[in-house]
Amino acid sequence: MIGQLFSYLFLWYFFTVTTFGIWVPAGIFVPGMLMGCALGVLYLDLMVYGFGFSLLRIGASSYLVIGCAAMLSGYTRLTYSLAVVMMETTQSINLFIPIFITIAISHGVGRIFNRSLYEYSIRAKQMPLLRDHVPKCNEDLRVKQMLIDLFGDATGDRLELVSSVCKVQRLAEVMNSARNFNTLAVVNTNGALIGLIPKSMVVVLIEQHQWYEHKFTTTGETIEKAFEQI
């Protein structure tokens, strides 16, 4: 019996890894449920034959559901929604607390070792998805320092950031110095990045005189001379 369970678990694991690795749309949710049920039965056999527990006393079907929940939470990182799905699938309200505890433990142990399987899939497909947290080593990192580390040595330009409220003369100086960049990084007063603006759009805005003249101290002739050098 135990040998058959190990063979069943190994075959499903092998086929799941193979189909997922070659980008075949075979799904990983149902195979995860089957492998989790197999692990639950193996743990049940360990409790019965290894430690001598009574099968009627500990409940046989409970370990199938708990093993399935643990397996799914381990690689999908689902939490409360998975507990609700398992409870609705089995119609066992009395297993909600054990399932929730199992999911919490599986989720916590999984986060210690690696990311979820879906995060690895997103990174493999090069999808531009931001994480839900900032790495501790980058909490105090500013955009200017990051751009200098990435591009400063390669281009040789003096990287400058544009404030969300700045003078036209400042835009002319930045565009004249950053010749190898097609966009400019815009930051707020705290130095946090709020967006990017193409240099072509900046040129159009200045050509159409889209600025507040009462806050502008430099003459138009000075700006025209500055942009002639770009």
Image: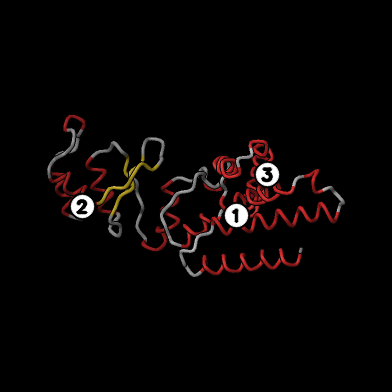
Label 2 amino acid? Ser
Residue at 16% from the left image edge and 33% from the top image edge: 213
SS state under label 3:
helix
195 sits left or right of 201 in the view? right
Please, is residue 201 above or below residue 16 in the view?
above
Q: Of the numbered discs in the image, which one, if any, rests on residue 33?
A: 1
What residue is shown at x 59% (from left), y 57% (from top)?
32
Residue 45 occupies quadrant = bottom right
Query: Which residue in the protein does label 2 denote?
Result: 200
In this orientation, which residue lies closer to the viewer: 131 or 192? 131
Question: Looking at the picture, how far across and down is residue 110, in whole percent?
Answer: 64, 51
Image quarter in which the C terminus is found: bottom left
Q: Amino acid at mark 1?
A: Met
Q: Amino acid at mark 3?
A: Thr
Q: Earlier in the sequence, mark 1 or mark 2?
A: 1
C-alpha separation, residue under disc 2 versus residue under disc 3: 56 Å
Q: Residues within 10 Å of mark 1 (few under 14, many from 20)?
A: some
Residue 165, position as x, y percentages in the image: 28, 36
Left or right: where does residue 197 sit relative to residue 91?
left
Q: Residue furthest front?
A: 56
Pick the residue in front: 62 or 220: 62
- Circle 1 or circle 3, nearest the eye: 1
- In the rendered structure, which disc, 1 or 3, sits on the residue that comes first in sequence? 1
Which label lies toward us, 1 or 2? 1
Q: Which residue is mark 3?
A: 102
Q: Mark 2 vs mark 3: which is more N-terminal?
A: 3
Label 3 crowding class (10 Å Cα cut-off): few <14, some 14-19, many 20+?
A: many
Q: Nearer the viewer, mark 2 or mark 3?
A: 3
